[in-house]
Image (cartoon, rainbow, N blue to C red):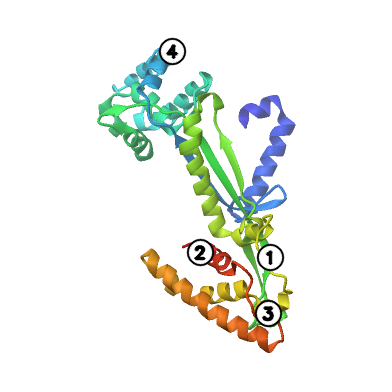
Amino acid sequence: MRALASAKPRLARSLSELSEVVEDEHLLERWPFPLDDRHLAMVVRQWIQEERSETFANLLLNDPFWAETTTMFRELWERSTKGGGADPMRNASRLFDNAKDLLAQIQVPTSPANIAFTVGRIISGEDIELLPTPHRHLIIAHQSDGQLLPARGVLLTTQIFASLSLLEDDTQSPKEASVVWLVQPDARLALSGDLAHVSGPFIKTDLANAILAHRDFARSLAQHPFTEISAIRKAQPGSFKSTLADNECHFDYIAEARREAQSRRDVLIQNDVEWKIDRDVKKILDRTQKRVAQRRRRAGLEGTPPRRWRLEAERLIRQDLEI
């Protein structure tokens, strides 16, 4: 800010005033946090890395700029540890920042493994104990059998949003209904990294698995209606469709079978072998066929069930219960 004040005093004053407002109003402590026209409820960040590579290590070691710069940093570090008056632990954060800047200048991902490898080439093994605990753990975490190696990778970030909604309860009057934050299903995914260092196998395996894991986590908090399996199946061309109106669903063989299966969900999902699941689902279908046929006859409707309804009902029951 002092450097900015001499070059752009009006901008420095504006930024200073803005900083004071943020601090006075405790804006950074608000959560969900206002972001654009939405409210950010959670951020999940994960480094996805390829396998650590000795070949990649040799590429860095053979790069003149990387080698010369790390040598310079090593000399500065050794001076600070030999009674020069500077505190090595005070220099550690600066050392890691320098490692990040160096990697960025040679267009190498600033992944944790690459930072650890670079810092590990600057300081000796005995000096690791001089580093603050987080920095020390970063280096140790990327060592295997005493060998420190770099790894290409990307940063995967998932932003999860929330919105204010009226929580209605059947036991409450409308005036007593409370307003709560509800997680929204439209999570946002972002990748940060250099595509030049991302290989095809890495995208198909490590990165794909990580994205699916982030998606599943976001779905566990709020699922978009278009991603529900029942809605997708109903919308697929050629899917089984009931010709009955919604208020006549108790005359629908499939709807009745799925309803009973849901009511017996705990029993069905506890079955540990396939034949027990088949047996219990068959019993549900048998009872459904008798029950719905009787209802239809009493109502003066055709009692013969549709063709292949049992196969369709069993498929949907397994989808509903994920068995």
Q: CA distance from mark 4 to mark 1?
A: 65 Å
Task: Point out the image quarter for the N terminus.
Answer: top right
The answer to which image quadrant residue 178 occupies is bottom right
Q: Which mark is residue 63?
A: 4
Who comes first in sequence, dot 2 or dot 3?
3
Q: CA distance from mark 1 to mark 2?
A: 18 Å
Q: CA distance from mark 4 to mark 3?
A: 68 Å
Q: Which residue is mark 3?
A: 176
Q: Residue at x 59, y 66 (%)?
A: 308
Few, some or many residues within 10 Å of mark 2 (<14, 14–19, 20+):
some
Q: CA distance from mark 1 to mark 3?
A: 41 Å
Q: Which residue is mark 1?
A: 241
Answer whether residue 308 is visible to the viewer in this image: yes
Callout 1 touching callout 2 (CB < 8 Å)? no
Q: Nearer the viewer, mark 4 or mark 1?
A: 1
Q: Which residue is mark 2?
A: 318
- Secondary structure under the numbered disc 4 in the rendered image: loop
